[in-house]
Image (cartoon, rainbow, N blue to C red):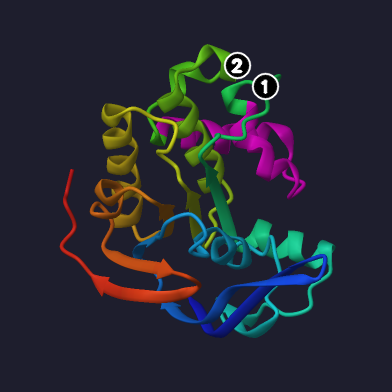
Amino acid sequence: MLVIKDLHKSYTTGKSSLHVLKGINLTINEGEFVSIMGSSGSGKSTLLNIIGILDEKDSGIYNLDGLPIEDLNEIKAAEYRSKFLGFVFQSFNLIGYKNALENVALPLYYQNIPRKERNAIAMEYLEKVGLAQWATHLPNELSGGQKQRVAIARALVANPKVILADEPTGALDSKTTFDIMKLLQEINNEGKTIIVVTHENDVAAQTKRNVELKDGVILFDQMIEQKVL
């Protein structure tokens, strides 16, 4: 599903250069539930941005579903993101003037699916995350947990190959974190590949594999016994 070999990434500011990723090797198979951990500056966000085709590597290999991710223009990068990836963010990134249904349906709009059809599909996914009755509510009428459920439904609606979740519980209390991780477990158990970036050990313990970065290299990569919620 996802193969990374000898991946390097540096950023240059003025006369100084920061080598963020220093030869990352990582393979994630279809259906895995992986957490990528690390403190601030470890390189985990940079790695996620490269996996999400939001940033470009300097060197190395990145293949996604058998396709090389290399020298893409923005149109092609956007096409690949739409086709292969669903995103869940700490800050939810919902559009404030659109209701829950419209937010979930948005990726289908960019795929030129007719309005009636995309709204029907979006409602199915709102039902999946337990929010069908909140379909007409705006984001400011929803709790943090409800917003994240809407964001997860939006990430799933186009049936991507991989869900990328960047600190998906970072803005949530412990009870809501539990509920969101349980939902992600259920989605993974249905066969969806999920990659979670987190700094929280409790969140990582609820995935099936932990990858920890430190100073731009993988410190350890191990399968764990998932805590079923």
Q: Nearer the viewer, residue 172 or 32?
A: 172
Badge 1 amino acid = Gly
Q: Are marks 1 and 2 in contact (CB under 8 Å)?
A: yes
Q: Quadrant of residue 13?
A: bottom right
In the image, the segment drawn in magenta is 102-127
Residue 115 x %, y %: 72, 33
Task: Determine which residue is flagged by label 1.
Answer: 96
Q: Residue at horizontal 79%, vertical 73%?
A: 72
Q: Quadrant of residue 9?
A: bottom right
Residue 139 x %, y %: 58, 20
In this rendering, is residue 98 above or below 26?
above
Visible in this render: residue 36? yes
Badge 2 crowding class, 10 Å Cα cut-off, few under 14, some 14 to 19, many 20 or more, is some
Q: Nearer the viewer, residue 118 or 37?
A: 37
* Residue most extreme to the top: 141
Task: Determine which residue is flagged by label 2.
Answer: 138
Residue 109 falls within the magenta-colored stretch: yes
Q: Residue at horizontal 28%, vertical 57%?
A: 207
Q: Quadrant of residue 179?
A: top left
Badge 2 amino acid = Leu
